[in-house]
Image: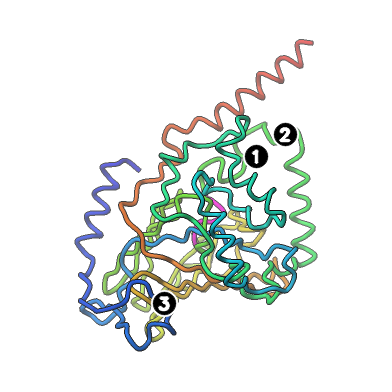
Amino acid sequence: MSHRSLAAWVIVIALGCLAPASAAGQSQAEDAADTASTWTMPRLPDGQPDLQGYWTTQTFTPLERPEYLGEKEFFTAEEVAALNAQLTAEGVDPSARNAVEIEDPEERERRLYQVNRDPSYVHYDNEIWLRTPVPKGLSTQRTSLITDPPNGRMPALTPEAADKLAAEAAARRLPNVFDSHLHRPLPERCIVWSHEGPPNLPPAYNDIHQIFQTPAYVVVFTELTTNPPRIIPIDGRPYVSRRIGQWAGDSIGRWEGDTLVVETRNFNEKRRYRGATEEMTVVERYTRVADDRIHYEVTVEDPNTWMRPWSAEVPMVATEGPLYEYACHEGNHDIRHILEIYRNLERQAAAK
């Protein structure tokens, strides 16, 4: 998408957005329980809860509970303080997303500072591209974003899904994975990233979401995405035909009290989110609980892939804009260079 067309799209949406109604509140509230007696839900003129603004999902809290923590669902306040002191220190790499999964504190620190201390480590310029207005720490006292199953880990795969994923992993080790662009992973081709919503799970970087609202739609514009913004109808319309699979699925929203519930189905069979099939369904729940926070819950189900559904919680914290275009394919020569390198290697091997 060109910068001109993106700007035009943003202007059109912005003109259609409703101005938020004024509301008093406490911006530092942690959750709904703490603010119930003192905070008023901001609303749009038509009465909808106001979810508009810029929201970050940045966190070092891992999706799955680290195995060394066993059945421990929450860190203690002291453990959170110690971890946050380490995770938010000067020079820490904000994209070291697996740091909390490392049990040994010294090894964890090595991973957190690898960008600045290991000259062999190739990375982006964090000062420019990995902007973090607020230091990235743990989002809550939870030891994982996954809340169900109770062990905080992904549920078991079905036997069929396990076999299929094993076969796909074996295929990726074959020499022909460099024969064509069709053999390369979808993120490498700038088609879809694994974290792209739904479900909206935190990426390693560029984790801002902008939300627009009109009486008939809610628009979720994700920073790190290769697909158009999610324009979610909330006017009661039906889903499109199941024969029309989409990379981000087909999302329909509704209000349940003050919670926006978005149910998504009809995924493209090629997306394969964590091995899921086109039968995957995703139910998201957005609830504003403070001036600076939206409580985001998501449940994912695919009976062809997992033995049971799984759920996660991700706080969305107010942050600053603007939201920049993530032009993944613009100036991206990776695929061309990868294939050229392997054609050269093949010619060299044939010449011996």
- Residue at 66% across, 50% down: 108
Find residue 192 and report its horizontal and vertical position in percent.
52, 50
Nearest to the observer: residue 32 or residue 15: 32
Mark 2 or mark 3, earlier in chain: 2
Q: Amino acid at mark 2?
A: Asn
Q: Nearer the viewer, mark 2 or mark 3?
A: 3
When the figure is inspected, residue 302 is found, relative to residue 136, above or below; the finding is below
Amino acid under disc 3: Thr
- What crowding class fits label 2: few (fewer than 14 Cα within 10 Å), some (14-19), or many (20 or more)? few
Which residue, given by chain and number where applicable, does mark 1 sit on?
183
Nearer to me, 51 or 178: 51
Residue that appears at 45% across and 54% down: 135
The numbered dot on residue 176 is: 2
Magenta stretch: helix, strand or loop mostly: loop
Residue stretch rendered in magenta on the structure: 192-198
Q: Secondary structure at mark 2?
A: helix
Instruction: State yes or no: discs 1 and 2 in contact (Cβ < 8 Å).
Output: yes
Q: Is residue 186 visible?
A: yes
Instruction: State the quadrant of the C terminus.
Output: top right
Residue shown at 61% from the left, 61% from the top: 62
Query: Which residue is the site of mark 3?
Result: 287
Using a 10 Å C-alpha cutoff, classify the residue at mark 3 as few (fewer than 14 neighbours), some (14 to 19) or many (20 or more). many
Q: Farthest residue in the bottom direction?
A: 37
Mark 1 closeness class: few <14, some 14–19, many ≥20 residues within 10 Å: few
| Labels 1 and 2: the sequence-earlier one | 2
